[in-house]
Amino acid sequence: MTKKLGQYFTINEIIYPVIRDLKVNPYILGFKIQVAGRLTRAERASFTVHSYQSVPLSTATSNIDFALDFTNLRFGMVAIKMWLHKKSSAKTHYYYFSYLF
């Protein structure tokens, strides 16, 4: 995602294909994607959250993966955070976060 942000894709062109892939993945119970930073020339940074079903962040027994990545654009810094709520029987697959890097 951060590579495409550097190539001046819009945030919706980047996020919606990822959301579509995560929704059909049988190992994902829910997810939350947070994008914050200066995406445009506006003085105030924007903040968007896309979520699907539940991501229980306060439960210690749930299987949650977290990824964070920063990138510098010509308007300022942008951060992308992603939480994935996986099934407990799911094997560890590292391609979940290949979207970020």
Image (spheres, rainbow, N blue to C red):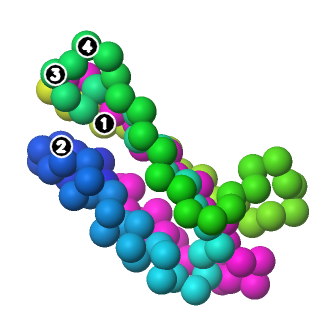
Left or right, 74 with reference to 98: left
Relative image position of residue 100 (x, y in whole percent):
38, 56
Which residue: 24% across, 32% down?
Answer: 39
Is label 3 or label 1 in front?
A: 3
The residue identified by callout 2 is: 6
Q: Earlier in the sequence, mark 2 or mark 4?
A: 2
First in residue order: circle 2 vs circle 1 = 2
Residue type at mark 2: give it.
Gly
Report how far apart the C-alphas of labels 2 and 1 lie in the structure. 8 Å
The C terminus sits in image quarter:
bottom left
**Whether label 2 touches label 1, CB < 8 Å:** yes
Residue 8 x %, y %: 12, 44
Callout 1: SS: strand
Residue nearest the observer in this picture, 96 or 17 = 17
Instruction: Tell me the residue that label 1 is attached to.
Output: 71
**Which portion, as a residue range, is magenta?**
75-101
Q: Residue at x 18, y 43 (%)?
A: 6
Q: Earlier in the sequence, mark 3 or mark 2?
A: 2
The CA distance from mark 2 to mark 4 is 19 Å
Left or right of residue 57, residue 93 in this image:
left
Vertical side of 20 occupied by 75: above or below: above
How far across and how far down the image is residue 20, in percent?
38, 73
Sequence-first disc among 4 and 1:
4
Query: Label for residue 43?
Result: 4
Disc 2 versus disc 4: nearer the observer = 4
Question: The residue tagged with tag 2: helix, strand or loop?
Answer: helix
- For the N terminus, give its image quadrant: bottom left
Given this view, does label 4 or label 1 mark the residue nearer the observer?
4
